[in-house]
């Protein structure tokens, strides 16, 4: 990969990049428990300190930042690398939080859906109606792990419903440009699924052999684990890919468009910004970097983006 510009270093497992109106990038530092701003000159400052494990981040219709908080990870550190290794003793529970970017005030919107506690909320995307979908990857323990789910909720805290369950380690989530398809990337299987939507928060379930009502879209041979994703204006899905360290670009028809290598096996997330949305901002979490990369095709402008 050429033309990688490093914007910030020393971040504690960054994720969830969001380009703000002034050109700075908000992101989370999972291992630090913060929502953080990286200014255009590379200055790093803390927006909020929700604690736990802030993981996914999105701008909502009210200008607030919405955070998927996984409750925290245990960590392994070695020179030049940090990585999550399970659930910590001080796990604080999964939740969705609203953060005021001006004051840093954090409000818990959801920590359960009915009687079901949220375990490890991971990634989030808003639709045009002002609601949001989010993945709950669950938590892994020494001898077992949770079943994952996908939820739909309102930004005012008044409504949440489970739309997909069970699904193995759901991570990245995004909407097609016409919002008729919801994409979900599965970490441990390295699979990308498509869920056809009948209405906001309601999927049209495909029968067996689908394990959860989704359409299988793509995976490839080799040891790859999928993380968060973003969608291009063309409808291509750009999936941050762990272990190989790349952004895997997949067409809506399930065809590999390209694999863009990145200098970190923990390449975890991507968002678009800049002129015509032709700049990709990528979190390299293992080495603690936010980088900018020129992109061949324009990204999709997110609902309520600055």
Image (cartoon, rainbow, N blue to C red):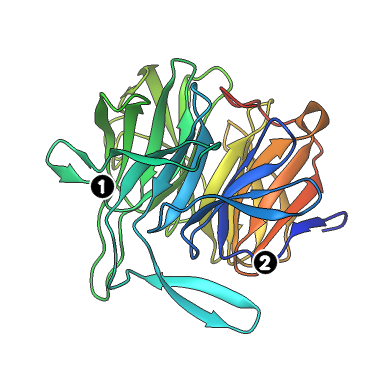
Q: Closer to the observer: label 2 or label 1? A: 1
- The answer to whether mark 2 and mark 1 are in CB contact below 8 A is no
SS for tag 1? loop
Checking the image for residue 220, the label placed there is none
Report whether 30 appears left or right of 92: right
Dividing the picture into quadrants, the one containing residue 108 is: top left
Dividing the picture into quadrants, the one containing residue 116 is: top left
Work out whether residue 303 or residue 216 is closer to the camera in this orientation and state it.
303
SS for tag 2? loop
Q: Can residue 221 be seen in this view?
A: no
**Quadrant (top left, top right, bottom left, bottom right) of the N terminus:** bottom right
Residue 218 percent location from the top left of the image: 53, 44
Q: Residue reaching furthest left?
A: 115
Residue 243 percent location from the top left of the image: 58, 67
| 216 relative to 89, above or below | above
Residue 131 percent location from the top left of the image: 40, 23
Q: Is residue 120 visible?
A: yes
Residue 184 percent location from the top left of the image: 45, 40
Checking the image for residue 118, the label placed there is 1
| 282 relative to 60, above or below | below
Q: At x 45% / y 74%, what residue is drawn?
A: 75
Work out whether residue 80 or residue 11 is closer to the camera in this orientation and state it.
11
Work out whether residue 211 or residue 8 is closer to the camera in this orientation and state it.
8
User: Residue under circle 2?
Assistant: 264
| 135 relative to 231, above or below | below
Report whether 251 appears left or right of 208: right
Nearest to N terminus: mark 2 or mark 1:
1
């Amino acid at each position: 990969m050429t033309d990688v510009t490093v914007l910030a270093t020393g971040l504690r497992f960054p994720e969830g990049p969001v380009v703000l109106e002034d050109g700075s990038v908000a992101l989370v530092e999972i291992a630090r428990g913060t929502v953080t701003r990286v200014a255009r000159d590379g200055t790093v400052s803390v927006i909020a300190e929700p604690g736990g494990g802030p993981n996914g981040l999105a701008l909502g219709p009210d200008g607030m930042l919405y955070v998927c908080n996984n409750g925290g990870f245990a960590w392994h550190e070695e020179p030049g690398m940090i990585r999550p290794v399970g659930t910590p003793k001080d796990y604080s529970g999964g939740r969705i939080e609203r953060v005021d970017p001006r004051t840093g005030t954090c409000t818990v919107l959801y920590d359960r859906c009915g009687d079901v506690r949220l375990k490890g909320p991971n990634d989030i995307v808003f639709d045009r109606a002002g609601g949001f979908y989010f993945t709950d990857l669950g938590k892994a323990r020494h001898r077992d792990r949770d079943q994952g789910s996908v939820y739909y909720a309102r930004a005012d805290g008044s409504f949440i419903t489970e739309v997909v369950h069970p699904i193995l380690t759901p991570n990245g989530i995004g909407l097609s440009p016409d919002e008729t398809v919801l994409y979900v990337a599965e970490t441990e299987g390295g699979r990308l699924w498509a869920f056809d939507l009948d209405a906001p928060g309601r999927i049209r379930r495909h029968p067996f052999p689908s394990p959860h009502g989704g359409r299988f879209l793509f995976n490839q041979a080799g040891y790859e684990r999928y993380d968060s994703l973003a969608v291009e204006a063309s409808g291509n899905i750009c999936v941050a890919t762990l272990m190989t360290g790349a952004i895997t670009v997949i067409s809506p028809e399930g065809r590999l468009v390209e694999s863009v290598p990145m200098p970190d096996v923990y390449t975890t997330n991507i968002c678009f910004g800049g002129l015509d949305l032709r700049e990709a901002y990528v979190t390299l979490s293992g080495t603690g970097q936010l980088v900018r990369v020129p992109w061949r095709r324009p990204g999709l402008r997110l609902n309520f983006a600055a």
